Amino acid sequence: MSTSEIKTITPDEVVFTEATPHQRELSWRINSISWSHPLSLEDHLERGALLGPRGPERTFYVVHRRGDPEDIICAVDAVGKTALVKAPDAESPTSVQRVKAYGVAAVHTNPTYRKQGMAGWMLQKLQEAMDKDSEFSVLYSGIGPDFYARYGWDAFPALQVSLSFLGGEAAAQPTMPAGVKFLSREDIAPLCDKDIAKLTARFEEFPGDDGRTRVAFLPTFKQIDWQFERNAFVARKLRHREPENYGAVTADGSSWIYWVHEVGKDTLGVLRIVANGPAAVADLLRAALVEAKGWGFERVVVWNPEGDVEDAVRTMGTEDEKVVKIRFEAREGRLPCLRWKGGDHVDVVWEDNYYYAWC
Ligand SMILES: CC(C)(COP(=O)(O)OP(=O)(O)OC[C@H]1O[C@@H](n2cnc3c(N)ncnc32)[C@H](O)[C@@H]1OP(=O)(O)O)[C@@H](O)C(=O)NCCC(=O)NCCS
């Protein structure tokens, strides 16, 4: 954009407010230059209207020019979620709390008003609003760690492992492991409840006296289903196809995985794995490979592989070497960042920092 197209603006001339439905649509029109691809503008607007009311409670904010509510300068969403927190407390070492926390999403400035500190000003206003009823907030940066660190959001690990199909005649097809079954969307709701109980039990076991605060977002079905729908919407528009298999479960029902079909990226993105050991993880990832192949995707991706997941993938590097190439890598976008309310310096361990928590 040339300098003649930039309009000057200062915080004295603007208002930070919850968006009306009309302002929401105006801001989606503006942010379509960044985020509609590969959808058309109309589909981008339809997706915004469809997904807004679904999933965890989402508040849309805009900054507009004072006296002109249609002159949108920047916008942001705050998604209210439930998180588990175990704070250091020597007197009550097993106390695990359920708290409100936010996911901050869709930070965007109208290109006409960029580089004048408006996004930074808006984020500070947003912090004032969020700090009134929550303990912490996270966001997933697409622009590296520095900008958000200025406002107190510190970066956390953003690694991933990709399992990419081999090409050529020597490549073997993935096969469904014995006893493993695909899961429909509805099958996943009761598993989320079991998962929450397990996660809470795990939190109770963490030491309460090592000075560290452990947090994790609850893997609720509402949260997960929003992600399913977000990706299914794109699959319908671009492939005219409805996903049927949203995950897989082992024969004994004790281990499961669920994923999203990222049609625009040719990727099956694993949201979460709940498993008893690396052998179960490997079988579940093989089911993911079968599903990915069925959609003609290039890869399966898992965020922040650690523990059993890392062990399983390393084993697959040998056992499945004719099917996939395994690569551990730094994630380029969606860098998780966390800020405690009031900008307090808290030594946080973000447990289960996986794709399911993305907003
Ligand atoms: C990122 C964005 C919201 C910043 O809006 P803004 O009102 O211009 O922001 P501010 O004036 O408060 O701050 C500007 C700073 O943002 C940072 N920034 C902006 N774009 C950036 C990018 N692509 N990569 C890294 N940092 C970036 C820089 O630190 C910049 O400072 P500089 O000009 O001294 O380099 C805006 O550029 C935008 O809407 N980009 C497209 C959508 C997007 O990427 N949103 C972020 C999603 S995580």
Image (tube, rainbow, N blue to C red):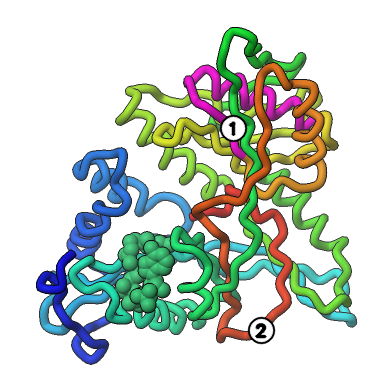
Look at 65% across and 16% down and name the residue there. Answer: 174
Density class for disc 1 (Cα within 10 Å; few <14, some 14-19, many ≥20) is: many
Residue 245, relative to residue 122: is it above or below? above
> Looking at numbered disc 1 in the image, what kind of residue is underneath it?
Val
Q: Which callout, 1 or 2, points at the residue further toward the start of the chain? A: 1
Q: Which residues are magenta?
A: 280-301
Q: Closest to the observer: 243 or 321?
A: 321
> Looking at numbered disc 2 in the image, what kind of residue is underneath it?
His
Q: Which quarter is ligand 1 in?
A: bottom left
Q: Position of residue 265 (x, y in %)?
A: 44, 36
The residue carrying mark 1 is 300
Q: Closest to the observer: 347 or 196?
A: 347
Q: Position of residue 349 (x, y in %)?
A: 73, 67
Determine which of the numbered discs, if any, sits on residue 345 in the image.
2
Q: Is residue 76 visible?
A: no
Q: Is residue 312 left or right of residue 123?
A: right
